[in-house]
Image (spheres, coloured by chain):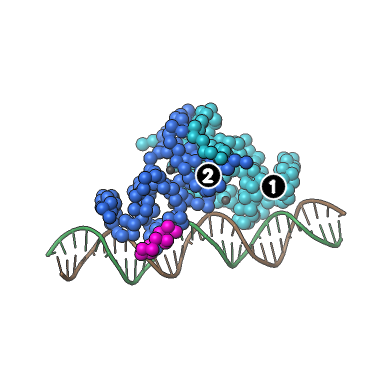
Chain colours: A cyan, B blue, C green, D brown
Amino acid sequence: MSNNSIFIKKLRSSGLRPTKQRIKICKLLFDRKNTFHFTINYLNNILKNKHSEKISLATVYNTVNAFKKKGYLKEILISSDKSYYDTNISKHHHFYDENKRELIDLDDKDVGKINIKKVLPGKKINSIEVLVKVANNN
Amino acid sequence: MSNNSIFIKKLRSSGLRPTKQRIKICKLLFDRKNTFHFTINYLNNILKNKHSEKISLATVYNTVNAFKKKGYLKEILISSDKSYYDTNISKHHHFYDENKRELIDLDDKDVGKINIKKVLPGKKINSIEVLVKVANNN
DNA sequence: AGACAGTTTATAATGATTCTAAACTAGTGT
DNA sequence: ACACTAGTTTAGAATCATTATAAACTGTCT
Ligand SMILES: [Mn+2]
Ligand SMILES: [Mn+2]
Ligand SMILES: [Zn+2]
Ligand SMILES: [Zn+2]
């Protein structure tokens, strides 16, 4: 597993000890080509179904919160009953499929430049997020 | 209180009995010029501080959920620890002030037209929401 | 190896929301 | 006016996602 060393470096460089739990979660989250959108519950289920050593739910929460704090994950708020996390930490927009209850990344070219004309004195814009809710036709 | 009758009609017309609790909440929510953005907790505090008869928290939840279901309120998701409701039920976008933790409506003219170029086969767009997070300068 | 801070874990606590079921009430019919 | 009924309110219990606790464990440094 030569790519473990990448995650070990990443974890060490941000002051997180490379424990086997964190490395396993790193591999699951970051060792893939495409963006991964997930809920804690979904992540926990995947981890349970891998028949390696069990990771406690508290650790899953701790790890996701730690990765979020370090900027390796973004939290995406969609519906009051689920919190999604996103391995794509760049500024980007989303489709939300209300039937599959799934997020899909949008390219900037799919959305076009958004130019906010209103200015609030003393305030600066930190982020602009577009959420496009889609559902099945008919 | 001549304007009570407006709310009584509104409630009756949507199959909700005009109880004194619902009328009081209607007046608080809808008898105002500007959009009102609130959390359940904030609404409940306002109701507690009016020294008329107490409304139980369960009723506040029931009423807000009923009004949301009838389309008199929209739920706005901003942060995982709070759910906001909005008396402005038209399609519109928001500023979110991360310091005051407050929503501000954006006019359509403040956000140009958003034209989503990507099409998902078999899916239709239900809504497009822009959230602009702002914070204090410096 | 030994020391120690950081981490994991089972379990408890928290807190927002929903549920329950008994008491209350608005609307309807007589 | 009175009673009937379905809808509503309410206090308190239940639920469930998340966070806190504290004991056991482990990665890192010397
Ligand atoms: Mn809700
Ligand atoms: Mn969170
Ligand atoms: Zn994404
Ligand atoms: Zn609004």
- Name the residue type under label 2: Asp
Of marks 2 and 1, the one in the foreground: 2
Q: Secondary structure at mark 1?
A: helix
Q: Is disc 1 surrounded by few (<14), some (14 to 19) or many (20+) residues within 10 Å?
A: some
The answer to whether residue D21 is above or below residue A44 is: below
Q: Is disc 2 surrounded by few (<14), some (14 to 19) or many (20+) residues within 10 Å?
A: many
The residue singled out by tag 2 in the image is B97
Would you say residue B106 sits in the magenta stretch? no
Q: Which residues are magenta?
A: B45-55
Q: Residue at x 58, y 36 (%)?
A: A91
Can residue A53 be seen in the rendering of this structure?
A: yes
Residue A57, position in %: x, y? 60, 56
The residue singled out by tag 1 in the image is A23
Which numbered tag is attached to residue A106?
none
For the C terminus of chain A, the quadrant is: top left
Residue B59, position in %: x, y? 38, 60
